Amino acid sequence: MNAGHRSESVPNASRLRIAVLAGGVGGAKFVRGLRQVAPEATISVITNTGDDLWLAGVRVCPDLDSIMYALAGVNDAERGWGRAGESERVSAELAAYGAGWPWFTLGDLDLGTHLARTSWLREGATLTEATARLAARWDLGVSLLPMSDDPVETHVVTEQGTMHFEEWWVRHRAALPALAFEQVGADRARPTPSVLGALASADAVLLAPSNPVVSIGTILGVPGLRDAVVSSSARIVGVSPIIGGAAVRGMAAQCLAAVDVDVSAAAVARHYGARVDGGLLDGWLVDTVDSAVVPELDSEGMRAVARPLYLSSLEQSAAIARDALAVALG
């Protein structure tokens, strides 16, 4: 870590209210770093639920679970998803019966989460309530909030037909060119009171380095949610998921291509837009390799800052979170 790029706790963090918009793995790493530097802050993580699906009779919420497992310290860091120390006996039985998706493996421990969630949903709990009950088992240090209690599922339009995002992502590894993304049910969805309250009371609103199209974009696509973000009195600061013209992880490049956005830190910043011009961003963190774009983004109304952005360790994640907070609170 270079000089001046530290991860000490943020002063007076106990008074801070921070709202984070996040997807799965990248969002989980960022939020772990944020918790490290602001352990006494009230942190609300508004999470994408567009990846959610019904599978073999249970409700699966990939991004909510990825963040919960990572913050609880029980995630499989090597695979990047699911629980550490998993077995897959139930999935093997489902495959033998021809049930579910054989290419979408649910670990036995993970299935426990999905079964608990499904039982509460079928008893009438909202997704927010079910998520809180799951999170209560762990010492997460944040409030984990679904973007909506209403079901929204991201579907991908390809030349071979329209499919659930997880089928495109996991089964096909995004090898089928995406023609468009559809958020099925978004027109009927609404942000929850918890989400609206977190945004209204926030001292800082942060966009994690998650996929700008199918994670952050899906969250912002819930009617009323983008307006709630923009109307917040807090500064809105994002962290680029693109470093040196490439996605840090996942298939963000394929997603950006589908919406005609170049794979660059500057292009994603402009995709979100400067708040002074009706967009979202007051500030934007880019990696040091992209420092040349800082003056031009500054001139467009976004306070741009160049910092090392690889989330390769908890210490580095914490340093990035601290830098994002510094821009939001400075």
Image (cartoon, rainbow, N blue to C red):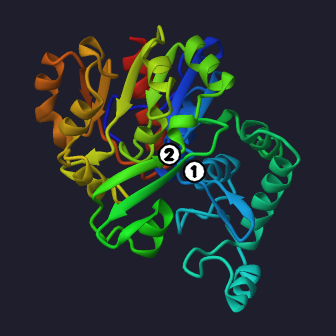
- Taking depth in this image into account, of 273 and 38 the one nearest to the observer is 273
In the figure, is residue 262 to the left or right of 111?
left
Kind of residue at disc 2? Gly
The image shows residue 261 at horizontal and vertical percentages of 20, 44
- Taking depth in this image into account, of 134 and 141 the one nearest to the observer is 134
In the figure, is residue 142 to the left or right of 116?
left
Q: Which tag, 1 or 2, sits closer to the chain's start? A: 2
For the question of whether residue 2 can be seen, the reply is yes
For the question of whether residue 250 can be seen, the reply is no
Residue at 75 percent across and 87 percent down: it is: 93
The image quadrant that residue 41 belongs to is top right
Q: Residue furthest bottom?
A: 96
Quarter of the picture holding the C terminus: top left
Kind of residue at disc 1? Asp
In the figure, is residue 107 to the left or right of 266?
right
Q: Are marks 1 and 2 in contact (CB under 8 Å)?
A: yes
The image shows residue 303 at horizontal and vertical percentages of 25, 19
The image quadrant that residue 192 belongs to is top right
- Taking depth in this image into account, of 289 and 52 the one nearest to the observer is 52
Determine whether 74 is above or below 282 in the image. Answer: below
Residue at 54 percent across and 33 percent down: it is: 34
Determine whether 211 is above or below 268 in the image. Answer: below
Q: Residue 52 carries which label?
A: none
Residue placed under numbered mark 2 in the picture: 23
**Please, what secondary structure does the residue beneath circle 2 have?**
loop
Q: Say few, some or many: other residues with alpha carbon within 10 Å of mark 1 (under 14 / 14 to 19 / 20 or more).
A: many
Quarter of the picture holding the N terminus: top left
CA gap, disc 1 and disc 2: 6 Å
The image shows residue 15 at horizontal and vertical percentages of 63, 11
Residue placed under numbered mark 1 in the picture: 63
Residue at 58 percent across and 35 percent down: it is: 189
